[in-house]
Image (spheres, helix red, strand yellow):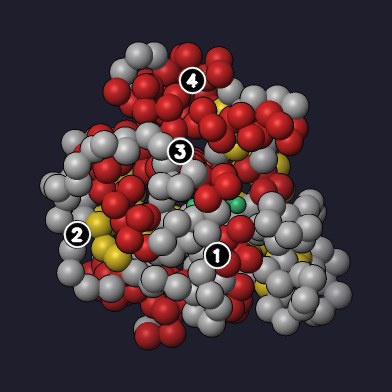
Amino acid sequence: KKKVILDVDTGIDDALGILLAVRSGEMDVLGITTVNGNVSLHQATLNTCKILQLLQMENEIPVVKGANKPLMRPTFFEHRVHGKDGLGGALKDMPVHTKVLEGHASDFIVEQVRRHQGEVTLVMTAPLTNLALAVMKYPDLIHQVKEVIVMGGVVQGFGNVTPTAEFNMYVDPEAAKIVFQAGFPNLTLVGLDVTRKALLTDDHIQALGDSPIGRYVKESTAEYMQRYYERNGVRACALHDPLAVGVALNKQLVTTHHYYVDVETKSELCDGQTVCDFQNRLSKAANVHVCTEVSADDFLELFIRTLRA
Ligand code: BDR
Ligand code: CA
């Protein structure tokens, strides 16, 4: 099994990513680290615990809390998209009994990578604060991790917070810059360019059936789909974070190109923009495998099959 750590700010799609990872049976999830993002660190941690309880895996997979704010900026929550609680109101009455592991997420990441050198895949589906802290504390991390998969950014399209910035990049651009410039030999960026094509529809939800997980997915995505409808005229839920998990499971789902990518941190209009040097104008070495295309149908099929199983 693939050893992975999931780093999440559990909102609606992070939760679906956790379900995909755990249910796949192909991942040994060493731990789930939480961070401020869609919701507060506290809420993201509670939501993560609830999802593990839904899976009855709360005694198997440790949850570790990380940064409660971005490196240099105030928090910026996304309640419009994920609802007040981050799960679109689902599981709101579930009592949380999961015990959160002591210590900081960034230290947990370093410890696990050192323990399993060359074997750990980091799947980051939130602002990159925890990983930035981890590489600052332990720069050798870059050579000891197997690979890093980041849901974030957009290289050829428009943002989802500002005209140019995607949420995870926008919330902590300084952290993203540190991660991109750290020198990870194997970092893949799963951005809005591809995640916007991975759309869960009512038909998919119906195909999940009337199981606890099927009912949960239906309830947690209902509001999200409604808002997506108001903006785009179709009912759907973009599976941003699950696609990053999908890429960790199967690289064939996407086409990637190796480019130099950096993140804007000093602009009034463009903070958090991921700038991709397609034509190597800056003469810098490529640092990111950027996803440019996705077999969305194959991914959706994997997602539905795994959650229904
Ligand atoms: C990303 O931002 C968050 O709102 C989602 O959970 C996802 O990680 C999409 O831009
Ligand atoms: Ca997320």
At x 68%, y 56%, the residue is 161
Picture quadrant of residue 102:
bottom left
Q: Eyeballing the image, is 96 above or below 295?
A: below
Q: Eyeballing the image, is 232 above or below 267?
A: above
Q: Which mark is residue 100?
A: 2
Residue nearest the observer in this picture, 34 or 107: 34
- Between disc 1 and disc 2, the foreground one is 1
Residue nearest the observer in this picture, 211 or 277: 211
Which badge, 1 or 2, comes first in the chain's sequence? 1
Q: Amino acid at mark 3?
A: Gly
Circles 1 and 4, Cβ within 8 Å, touching? The answer is no
Q: Give the labeled residue for mark 4.
A: 205
Using the numbered discs, state the Cα–Cα distance from disc 3 to disc 4 in whole angstroms: 15 Å
Which badge, 2 or 3, comes first in the chain's sequence? 3
What SS does tag 1 mark?
A: loop
Q: Quadrant of the C terminus?
A: top left
At x 66%, y 34%, the residue is 228
Is residue 70 visible in the rendered image? The answer is: yes
Q: Amino acid at mark 2?
A: Val
Which badge, 3 or 1, comes first in the chain's sequence? 1
Q: Amino acid at mark 1?
A: Phe
Q: Give the labeled residue for mark 3.
A: 88
Position of residue 232 measured from the top left corner of the image (x, y, whole percent): 75, 32
Q: Is residue 127 left or right of residue 138?
A: right
Q: Eyeballing the image, is 62 above or below 181?
A: above
- Between disc 3 and disc 4, the foreground one is 3
Using the numbered discs, state the Cα–Cα distance from disc 1 to disc 4 in whole angstroms: 30 Å
